[in-house]
Image: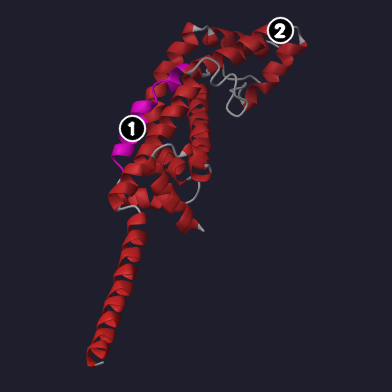
Amino acid sequence: MKKALLIIPFFCLILSSCDTLSQVAQTTVKQSANPTSLEMSSGLKQALELGTGKSADQLSAVNGFFGNAAVKILFPPEAQKVEKTLRSIGLGKLADNVVLSLNRAAEDAASQAKPIFVSAIKQMTIQDVTNILLGSQDAATNYFKRTTTQQLTDKFEPIVQASLNKVGATRYYTDAANTYNRVPLVKKVNPDIKNYVTQKAIDGLFVVIAQEELNIRQNLSARTTPLLQKVFGYYDKVKK
């Protein structure tokens, strides 16, 4: 009987220890389910490299700008009256050629964006990563706007100019502007189109990057690797 009484506390001690070990194990699993700082950094950078690369590829393809209503480049606002006048006097084909050539120039420029984004991604600090991952739904897009706009401008301008010359856009737009400027009593417009196309090409790039960022934040199927699933699963949990 004494042995039995001694055995009972012993089993209680074992059971108590098992409960404690179980709690510790569960806690460990829960803790390990969260990404480490290294995983967060690697996962976010992986997502951004995929997203920016996809955006650049999409826009640099034929009709990447021209066939996408969200980023298609039209006549500059101050020159839309030029287009209207040209079409009204039977020069619609000239106006069409201008629009097509502006978009072709932007498509040529977009092909050069990838290395600039990759460089910006490599330079991210842990604080940048945290701010982007747990920030607003366009936090990454805003980071790229802040860190790459000047480089994109410097890179795009000569490409846009060369492309405008190659496809005849400079001639088309200059012809359109000069034709319009000969119409009596109209306010003259600037026939130089390079800066406008460069800025619209960069703006369009950021529009598509923002779409890609929103997609990976909201769409589980866009998280195509275990690392992305873990990092953005953590984002989902924290943002609830």
Q: Which mark is residue 91?
A: 2
Q: Is residue 85 shown to the viewer in this render?
A: yes
Of labels 2 and 1, the one closer to you: 1
Q: Main secondary structure of the magenta part?
A: helix
Categorize mark 2 by other alpha carbons within 10 Å: few (<14), some (14-19), many (20+).
some
Circle on res. 126: none
User: SS class of the residue under badge 2?
Assistant: loop
Secondary structure beneath label 1: helix
Colour setup of the view: secondary structure
For the residue pair 161 and 103, the one nearer the viewer reads as 103
Q: Which residue is mark 1?
A: 118
User: For the view shown, which residue lies furthest in the front direction?
Assistant: 1
Measured in 3D between alpha carbons, the distance from the residue under mark 2 to the one under mark 1, in whole angstroms, is 44 Å
**Residue 89 location (% of width, % of height):** 76, 9
Instruction: Give the residue displayed 51% in from the left and 7% down from the top.
Output: 167
Q: How many marks?
A: 2
- How many residues crowd around disc 1 within 10 Å: few (fewer than 14), some, or many (20 or more)? some
Question: Which residue sits at x=45%, y=58%?
Answer: 238
Residue 90 sits above or below residue 105 on the image: above
The answer, for residue 178, to whether it is visible in the render is no
Q: Which residues are magenta?
A: 108-124
